Image (cartoon, helix red, strand yellow):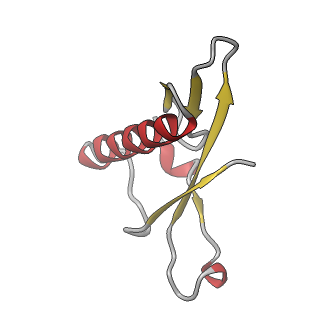
Amino acid sequence: MNAIRSIVPRDPSESGNMEGMQLTIRLLRETDGRWIGDVPELPGVSVYGATPEEATLKAKALAFRVMAEELEHGEMTPATDVVQFSLAA
């Protein structure tokens, strides 16, 4: 998996000179009440949580684990050390 192609660099003009990778967390409520959180820029990053907050935290944690694994194995070469998450509307 080469996730670096899927990670969208932020526009530096959005917040001063800080550049970073922008990842989106999408939340969806299941019919049984559980929440699914996924990060579309990182295939396979999909989690369940009892609340939107729990699903968000679990999605962030898994995204960091996936990125760390890919960095460690040379599958990702990030252009920055800054990662920013946003919630999909």
- In which image quadrant can residue 16 be found? bottom right
Q: Is residue 38 left or right of residue 77?
A: right
Q: Is residue 72 left or right of residue 70?
A: left
Q: Looking at the picture, does residue 17 appear above or below residue 26?
A: below
Q: Is residue 26 left or right of residue 59?
A: right
Residue extending furthest left?
A: 72
Relative to the observer, which residue lies in front, 8 or 52? 52
Q: Looking at the picture, does residue 89 appear above or below residue 50?
A: below
Q: Position of residue 55 (x, y in %)?
A: 50, 34
Q: Residue at x 42, y 68 (%)?
A: 82
Q: Looking at the picture, does residue 14 appear above or below residue 73?
A: below
Relative to the observer, which residue lies in front, 71 or 54? 54
Residue extending furthest right?
A: 89
Q: Position of residue 87 (x, y in %)?
A: 63, 50
Relative to the observer, which residue lies in front, 79 or 13? 13
Residue extending furthest bottom?
A: 16
Q: Residue at x 57, y 36 (%)?
A: 52
Residue extending furthest top?
A: 32
- In which image quadrant can residue 60 be found? top left
Q: Residue at x 36, y 44 (%)?
A: 75
Q: Is residue 8 left or right of residue 69?
A: right
Q: Position of residue 40 (x, y in %)?
A: 61, 39
Q: Position of residue 67 (x, y in %)?
A: 37, 46
Q: Residue at x 51, y 76 (%)?
A: 19
Q: Across the whole image, how many numbered discs are drawn on residues?
A: 0
